[in-house]
Image (cartoon, helix red, strand yellow):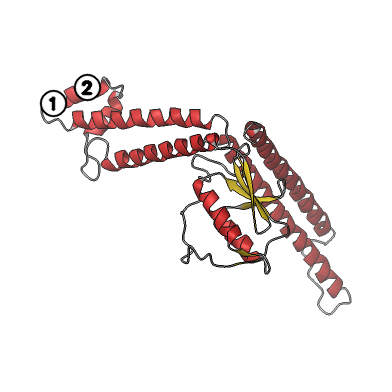
Amino acid sequence: MKNDFHERKQNKIARFKKLADKNESKSEQQFKRASQMASVIPFGQPILVGHHSEKRDRNFRARINNIQDQAMVSSSKAQYYAEKAAIAESNKSISSDDPNAIQKLTEKLEAMIQFQELMKAANKIIKNSKLTESQKIEKLGEHNIKEKHAVELIQPDYCNRIGFPSYRLTNNNANINRIRKRIQELENTNRMESSEMEINGIKMFTNVEGNRIQIFFPDKPEEAIRTKLKSHGFRWSPTEKAWQRQISQSALYWAREIITGIDVHQNDIVQNSHDPSGNGPTGHGEDCYSDADPGL
């Protein structure tokens, strides 16, 4: 699955574009059909109430309205899929399925660390009361900060703050820690080996190559089980015939929790005795579209 990441991404974009074109064409045909039907009614011709043609005329006009409504729905679908294709094409986030994810994340981490140090150095210069404004601008220039930006930094903002505000350093530092954690998780995943286990007749497959935790049920699970799977990030894959999500410690935990908590005789969920609260690791272990795209 990782090996064909870029191919799957392009296939996804192509599929969205094809659906957009299909619905756009369908919408045009429906609008044309409605227009042709409406053209047979003389302009301004009202429904002749009480006339033998009243019922037939009302039904005919209702059909026209119905086809127009269908055309609007098709047009909305075309716009929806066109936007999905554009988003997929412009998406620069780093997917965990990308075989070069660790390299890309490492480069991103290094850039964020450099920016963090730049903000600290700039604030130290800007808040130095011994320097004049021109000296501050000159020293900021030594850190490759353009004069226009330097002038903006030394001027108080609407909160009377100068330099890079503290929240930017805090947020950037939090993102640095998040990326570091994600790199560590990917490195741990790369060291894993694919494995399979069976509990209550339900198979759980750690698919390292595909970067998925997969659950295979012998039959379609009950709605309560499906709801719990979805609530913890698992999605049904028609291709794999399995409920799956990207590999993470949270995914492993919840996969075991769910299948060990199923009453095989009733095909329903029971409360696990070792976790009466039902609590466990929070989160789904992957970003939807921050740095990852599990839908690919």
Query: SS at mark 1?
Result: loop
Q: Is residue 51 left or right of residue 67?
A: right
Check disc 1: other Cα within 10 Å, few if <14, some if 14-19, many if 20+.
few
Quarter of the image containing the C terminus?
Answer: top right
> Which percent across, then down, holds residue 131?
13, 26
Identify which residue is drawn at 30% across, 24% down.
145
Q: Amino acid at mark 2?
A: Lys
Q: Residue furthest bottom?
A: 50
Residue 3 shows up from this direction: yes
Identify which residue is drawn at 65% across, 65% down.
223
Which label number is shown at residue 139? Answer: 2
Quarter of the image containing the N terminus?
Answer: top right
In front of the other: 48 or 177? 177
Q: Is residue 185 left or right of residue 15?
A: left
Residues at discs 1 and 2 in contact (Cβ within 8 Å): yes
Identify which residue is drawn at 31% across, 32% down.
116
What's the distance in space between the residues labelled 1 and 2, CA to CA? 10 Å
Q: Residue furthest right?
A: 52
Picture quadrant of residue 89 = top right
Going from the N terminus, do you reach mark 1 or mark 2 first? 1
Residue linked to disc 1: 131
